[in-house]
């Protein structure tokens, strides 16, 4: 009963004021029970915060302080969300980039007397408490899975997970956070920290929060980037294999149909290089963000990545070699982590070869004597996989049907790599 829970928190919560780590305890409580129906009530979650927080000891945002004190009853609206999220993102980025505490505040204890003296952990903890509190006000779960009995419980839990994923994808604060991390406002640029720090801070925060709320939606954004970005829907320059017959006919003094410029080069440059050159682009920025999330992520995050790539492969919607190369670029830096999870690793490799088999017939002019710049780099990727992270003969046998569907020249190249 929510009324009973609220009364208990209001009457007995004062006992927790003597807790040695009240802020950490509150964060852990919200983290574990963030989707419990009882907490999706403004009065209950406010009472929970009041039972553990002494607002004179923490540096929360004015919006959160107003909610806890009962002055407001809703999270920041759409108009105010941009400024609110920018301040939170800037606070974490400043702490990570400069290892500095927040600006001096005479109303707060000195940093060495506070529960969390580390400025990075303190900023993260307070931001997580705020975000999880706002999540509890976003939308309440509707499934009754916790009350169901087997076998109905399994179906109910599956329905609850789907509903939670849908609600997380629609959470305005998370969507605003992703937008600002990839396109910082003037307020964020004025912080004098590298732009990449905002992406790094987002990767850290996404893995401190429950995976379903930030990490998973941000990883699934890969589908939108791959399918919707015009630069990824262009075919890279064609390259013809060396032919002694053509060389003899054309003569040594004439070109023999070299490659055109790879239009998507900036997508695969380093993020900082693109910023310096004024070539920043959404696919490159997202790739940098994704790698930051995966760097701190666990097997659940990698599973979400594998499911996203599998969904793209199964959809048959990819049509260019640049999209294929982009998918290879997403998993390349984390191969050493994927290798520890055999079934997931093999599934990802199988999906990549499956995509290549779908894409090749759609590239105009691709024949036995030609290739493209992107496909050459994809072959280099598989050569690296075979050399450094070989999944084993059994795995390559599973992938063999997709290899057999490739054009003759590419099939021969990839089979030679596999047979090494």
Image: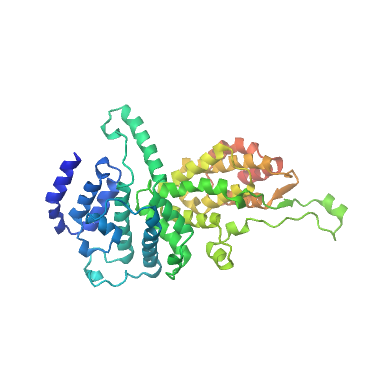
**Residue at coordinates 26% horizontally, 59% vertically from top-left?**
65
Residue ID at (25%, 49%): 29
- Residue 194 at what x, y percent from top left? 46, 67
Which part of the image, by quadrant, shows the N terminus? Answer: top left
- Whether residue 339 appears in this view of the structure is no
Please state which of residues 84 and 35 is positioned toward the viewer in this rendering. 84
Which percent across, then down, holds residue 55? 21, 61
Between 355 and 317, the residue placed more toward the observer is 317
Outermost residue toward the top in this view = 151
Depth order, front residue of 218/269:
218
The answer to whether 370 is drawn above or below residue 1 in the figure is below
Number of numbered markers: 0
**Lateral position of residue 241 relative to residue 156, left or right:** right
Where is residue 339 shown, x and y percent of the image? Answer: 48, 47
User: Which image quadrant for residue 52?
Assistant: bottom left
The quadrant where residue 270 appears: bottom right
Vertical side of 192 occupied by 288: above or below? above
Q: How is the image coloured?
A: rainbow
* Residue in the foreground of this view, choosing between 44 and 346: 44
> Is residue 16 at all visible to an observer of this figure?
yes
Residue drawn at x 61%, y 44% as measured from the top left: 418
Coordinates of residue 283 in the picture (x, y in percent): 55, 54
The correct choice, above or below, for 261 with respect to 404 in the image is: below
190 displayed left or right of 392: left
Horizontal arrangement in the rendering, residue 380 relative to residue 346 (left or right): right
């Amino acid at each position: 009963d929510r009324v009973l829970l609220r009364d208990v928190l209001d009457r007995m919560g004062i006992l927790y004021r003597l807790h040695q780590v009240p802020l950490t305890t509150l964060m852990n409580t919200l983290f574990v029970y963030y989707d419990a129906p009882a907490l999706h009530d403004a009065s209950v979650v406010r009472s929970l915060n009041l039972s553990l927080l002494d607002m004179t000891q923490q540096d929360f945002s004015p919006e959160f302080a107003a909610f806890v004190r009962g002055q407001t009853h809703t999270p920041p609206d759409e108009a105010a969300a941009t400024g609110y999220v920018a301040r939170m993102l800037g606070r974490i980025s400043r702490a990570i980039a400069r290892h500095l505490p927040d600006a001096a505040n005479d109303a707060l204890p000195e940093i060495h007397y506070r529960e969390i003296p580390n400025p990075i952990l303190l900023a993260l903890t307070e931001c997580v408490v705020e975000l999880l509190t706002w999540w509890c006000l976003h939308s309440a779960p509707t499934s009754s899975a916790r009350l169901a009995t087997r076998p109905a419980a399994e179906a109910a839990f599956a329905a609850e997970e789907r509903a939670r994923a849908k609600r997380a994808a629609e959470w305005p604060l998370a969507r605003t956070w992703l937008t600002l991390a990839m396109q910082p406002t003037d307020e964020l640029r004025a912080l004098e920290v590298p732009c990449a720090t905002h992406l790094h801070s987002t990767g850290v925060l996404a893995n401190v929060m429950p995976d379903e709320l930030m990490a998973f939606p941000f990883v699934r954004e890969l589908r939108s980037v791959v399918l919707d970005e015009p630069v990824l829907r262009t075919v890279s320059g064609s390259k013809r294999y060396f032919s002694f017959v053509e060389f003899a006919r054309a003569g040594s003094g004439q070109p023999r149909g070299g490659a055109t410029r790879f239009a998507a080069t900036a997508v695969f440059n380093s993020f900082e290089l693109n910023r310096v050159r004024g070539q920043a682009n959404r696919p490159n920025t997202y790739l940098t963000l994704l790698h930051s999330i995966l760097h701190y992520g666990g097997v659940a995050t990698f599973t979400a990545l594998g499911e996203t790539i599998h969904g793209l492969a199964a959809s048959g919607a990819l049509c260019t070699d640049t999209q294929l190369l982009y998918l290879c670029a997403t998993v390349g830096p984390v191969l050493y982590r994927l290798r520890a999870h055999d079934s997931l690793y093999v599934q990802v490799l199988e999906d990549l070869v499956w995509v290549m088999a779908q894409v090749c017939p759609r590239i105009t002019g691709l024949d036995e004597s030609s290739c493209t710049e992107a496909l050459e780099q994809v072959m280099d990727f598989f050569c690296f996989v075979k050399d450094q992270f070989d999944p084993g003969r059994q795995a390559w046998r599973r992938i063999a049907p997709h290899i057999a569907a490739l054009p003759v020249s590419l099939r021969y190249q990839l089979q030679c790599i596999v047979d090494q």
